[in-house]
Image (cartoon, coloured by chain):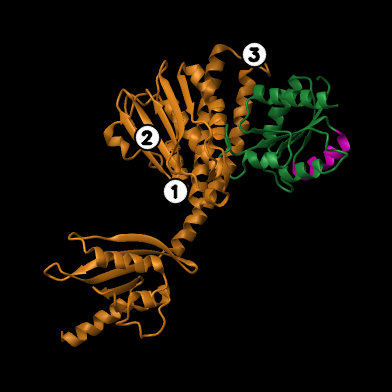
Amino acid sequence: MRGKKILLVDDDADFVEATKIILESRSYDVTVAHDGKEGLRKAQTEQPNLIILDVMMPEMDGYEVCTKLKSDTKYRHIPILLLTAVGEAIPTTKYTMEMGMKTEADDYIPKPVEPIELVERVENLFRISGSKT
Amino acid sequence: MPRRVMKEILATVINNLADGILVTDEQGHITLYNQKAQALLGIKGRTALGEPVKDYIKNEVLVGLINKILTLDLPFHTEEICLIDSGDSKLRVHVCPVRDENALLIGSVSLIHDTSQLSAIDKVKSNFLAMVSHQLKSPLSSTLLQTSILLDGMVGEVNEKQKDLLQKIKAKTKGMSDLINDILDVCYIEEGGYVTQIEFLNLSEILKRTIEVVQPQTQDKGINLQITVEDHLPFMHGNKSSMEAMCINLIMNAIKYTLSGGQVSIDLSKNGQCLQLKVSDTGIGIEEKDILRIFDKFYRERSERTKHISGTGLGLSIAKGVVDAHHGSISVESEVGNGTTFTVLVPIR
């Protein structure tokens, strides 16, 4: 699990900083992008082992980035964890988890998120993608 | 003032009213209408006077209301209020019976008010609220995460006093974040968004997922959760995320108002052409004076026995909004000190 590279794409600098602290405390190598376009570019150039992707972003939203990556055979294998800003434990508004699922994301997690939950989801995704290959 | 002049002034006033007015005799023949009514209801020409209302008014709902008032001839004052669609505009109509001094029914009078502008303002307000809520939610998510990091000691040890303060910050921030979620839900219901995406739903599946979400809370509080789901329930026509919101709000509410060691029972079954969801608790119950208001937005019982329970006051209004949008019904029975039962009935299609 250790030493794996995670690309974190979110336009909220505070959220990025906090998430980075959590992931780095688990020895993950974290690369950051601040909007959807930069996220897509870095996904292609940095070849991360996993992408954490916010939904609501300027330029290009998370769904679009996810769809673009999942439709490209070169990047399809990279697990994507979508962060949905709206909706609680169960999605209750427009940007529902349902939409997250339809974009072929590998998992989704609603904000606000607990550090332990985030780490568990990330580890779980690595476990699943590891067993596939 | 001579009678003739009076009559002319009256006619001018009626013609200049901002609302439409339409009067019929007891047979349902048009006896008077003003320019605004002509415009709003699309009455063509001046020939409508003396003609049956059904021949000149295209809107069946309004014609139906007028007929109802005239045929029922109820002894007391009645009034029918309804929102009707007329082309691009939404009209609110009031239909009242007209009686002479001997209380004999001699016709009907309809007031027609164009609410299009109001609806447009409402939509702007709703969008504004949603936008503001989104802007508020993001920083709160970050603050919560930052607080959790501090609390978990990821960036250095915290002492007991610091931990206590951080926990309070976290609880308050979480409360605000919950409130924003609820406000977003209310906005969405008011926009009518839930009605637009309708699909075949497996309500038992939705209920199962909801229960998974609330299970940790019931365990923390030592509440016994009893679940009964009838086998082979039919799928229903509805909006998935809103039904999820309805289930979680009702169940969370039951858990919230039930003391440790109590019980929450959930029962899903078929009742005629409807699915019936019953959520019962052995909680503190609702006082009679509050029962009529519990579905109001932001209404919360304020008393000694509820002051330690946190909430936004929107949960039940969300649940009712969802049930209404599905043409269902929600009812409540409660006894102070013994518990509360909410019963939801939603048509299968």
Q: Is residue B131 left or right of residue B68?
A: right
In the picture of the structure, the residue carrying the numbered disc 1 is: B327
Mark 3 surroundings within 10 Å by alpha-carbon count, few (fewer than 14), some (14 through 19), many (20 or more): few
Q: Quadrant of residue B8?
A: bottom left
Q: From the viewer's perspective, is residue B273 above or below residue B5? A: above
Query: Which label's residue is closer to the chain start, 1 or 2?
Result: 2
In the picture of the structure, the residue carrying the numbered disc 2 is: B300
Figure colour of chain B: orange
Q: Is residue B215 magenta?
A: no
Distance CA(mark 1)–CA(mark 2): 25 Å
Mark 1 surroundings within 10 Å by alpha-carbon count, few (fewer than 14), some (14 through 19), many (20 or more): few
Residue B232 appears in the figure: yes
Comparing labels 2 and 3, the label whose residue is closer to the camera = 2
Q: Label 1 sits on what residue type?
A: His
Q: Is residue A38 left or right of residue B44?
A: right
Q: Nearer the viewer, residue A9 or B160?
A: A9
Q: Label 3 sits on what residue type?
A: Glu
Chain for mark 2?
B
Asked if marks 2 and 3 touch (Cβ < 8 Å), the reply is no
Expressed as whole percent of the image width and height from the top left, the position of residue B196 reads 56, 52
Comparing labels 3 and 1, the label whose residue is closer to the camera = 1
Expressed as whole percent of the image width and height from the top left, the position of residue B113 reads 37, 66
Query: Which label's residue is closer to the chain start, 3 or 1?
Result: 3
Chain for mark 3?
B
Give the magenta part as a residue range. Answer: A35-47
Tell me, by letter, which chain the rendering colours green.
A
Q: Helix, strand or loop at disc 3?
A: loop
